[in-house]
């Protein structure tokens, strides 16, 4: 199985390639705007380097992993899609030209156009969204399959912008597509490193009938949990806290009501959990290629995440509720 890597920065080197080299049936190739980095990856992880996207696609990869920065990913995809790759595996957020904390409506519209072009040539797209593969997330998915919690009814999310697109994806994955968003911008911007953004808060209704709130901010210390997410159902509630926090389960639908806490072993840091989630997401995707099955997380999940952000920003800018799909349609196939 041939896997092509576009973009050989720290995320590729630290989170993707260590998992990919463990797969015995994978051959690797690289293309990067910084050729020296691609050469370093080839020397460390094996594989060959191509100087252009045209040469890389001509190699005949089973999938192209697009791991460039979100600020330049749109440019790379605009060059890559016309070359006719069979499959794309995409980092998140799909496109964010001003950074992940300042996604704009223009980012969504650009991504929608690129996704339509990929679908028109029969290119299958998938997203990483590795937070779905945290141990807590996988345990929650199993519980929701095994127990009768009923339909989702409430969502509450407090999110550091470093986790923003992931948590929006988790909310949409668990609560359904957003129908209406009413949002407000905070008055005081906060900084993290070179990034600066004001807080944003929104009330959301979902097509499942659930309602909820979400807050995005940089004003959360990195030494503490970076997000808190509560999902309420008719007969139960799930609470997540951070990259390696406990999963709290309130099961009030069972005859014997239960309050459970599922925890990781305490010698595992949150960054170990973070890196491990990449391996699980990548391995699940590779297995879908071997089986000829749909990807675990479709590319349209990334488009739906950007749609949510575009509607949120429009609502805050225009001080009114936004009908999400009515005003900012995903186009083409149904949303995930």
Image (spheres, rainbow, N blue to C red):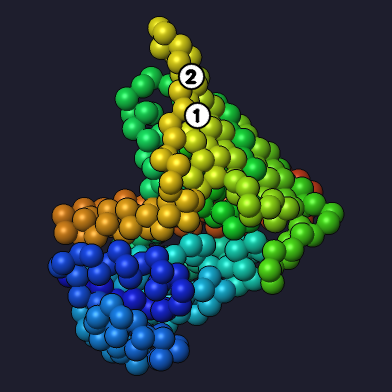
The numbered dot on residue 259 is: 2
Say above or below: 197 vs 235: below
Label 1 neighbour load within 10 Å: few <14, some 14-19, many 20+: some
Tell me if 2 is positioned left or right of 30 in this view. left
> Residue at the spot x=58%, y=68% of the render?
96
Q: Earlier in the sequence, mark 1 or mark 2?
A: 1
Per the model, the C-alpha gap separating discs 1 and 2 is: 7 Å
When asked about the image quadrant of residue 289, the answer is bottom left
> Residue at the spot x=38%, y=58% of the render?
278
Say above or below: 316 vs 255: below
Front residue of 2 and 119: 2
Give the image location of residue 117, x and y in percent.
Answer: 40, 70
Element assignment for label 2:
strand
> Residue at the spot x=69%, y=51% of the render?
220
> Residue at the spot x=64%, y=71% of the render?
98
Front residue of 309 and 189: 189
When asked about the image quadrant of residue 264, the answer is top left
Give the image location of residue 37, x and y in percent.
Answer: 41, 86
- Looking at this rendering, what residue extends furthest in the right direction? 187
Q: Is residue 278 visible?
A: yes
Element assignment for label 1:
strand
Label 2 neighbour load within 10 Å: few <14, some 14-19, many 20+: few
Give the image location of residue 188, x and y in percent.
Answer: 83, 56
The numbered dot on residue 248 is: 1
Where does the N terminus fall, quadrant-wise? bottom left
The numbered dot on residue 278 is: none
Give the image location of residue 23, x and y in percent.
Answer: 20, 64
Tell me if 167 is positioned left or right of 133 in this view. right
Q: Is residue 322 visible?
A: no
**Is label 1 in contact with label 2 (beta carbons under 8 Å)?**
yes
């Amino acid at each position: 199985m041939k896997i092509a890597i576009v973009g050989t920065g720290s995320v590729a080197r630290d989170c993707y390639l260590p998992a990919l080299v463990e797969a015995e049936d994978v051959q690797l190739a690289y293309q990067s705007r910084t050729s020296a980095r691609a050469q370093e990856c080839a020397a460390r992880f094996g594989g060959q380097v191509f100087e252009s996207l045209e040469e890389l696609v001509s190699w005949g990869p089973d999938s192209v992993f697009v791991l460039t920065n979100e600020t330049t990913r749109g440019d790379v995809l605009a060059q890559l899609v016309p070359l006719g790759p069979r499959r794309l595996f995409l980092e998140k957020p799909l496109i964010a030209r001003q950074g992940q904390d300042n996604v704009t409506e223009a980012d969504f519209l650009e991504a929608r156009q690129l996704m339509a072009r990929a679908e028109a040539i029969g290119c299958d797209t998938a997203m990483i969204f590795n937070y779905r593969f945290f141990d807590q997330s996988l345990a929650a998915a199993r519980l929701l399959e095994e127990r009768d919690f009923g339909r989702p009814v409430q969502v509450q999310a407090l999110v550091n912008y470093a986790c923003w697109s992931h948590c929006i994806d988790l909310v949409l994955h668990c609560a359904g597509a957003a129908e209406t968003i009413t949002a407000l911008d905070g008055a005081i911007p906060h900084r993290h490193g070179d990034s600066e953004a004001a807080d944003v808060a929104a009330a959301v209704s979902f097509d499942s009938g659930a309602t909820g709130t979400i807050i995005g901010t940089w004003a959360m210390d990195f030494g503490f949990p970076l997000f808190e997410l509560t999902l309420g159902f008719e007969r139960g509630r799930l609470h997540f806290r951070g990259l390696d926090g406990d999963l709290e389960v309130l099961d009030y639908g069972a005859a014997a009501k239960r309050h459970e806490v599922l925890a990781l072993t305490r010698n595992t840091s949150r960054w170990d959990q973070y890196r491990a989630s990449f391996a699980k997401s990548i391995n699940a995707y590779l297995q879908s290629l071997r089986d000829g099955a749909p990807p675990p997380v479709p590319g349209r999940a990334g488009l739906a995440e950007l749609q949510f952000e575009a509607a949120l920003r429009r609502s805050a800018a225009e001080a009114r509720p936004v009908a999400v799909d009515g005003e900012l349609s995903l186009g083409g196939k149904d949303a995930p």
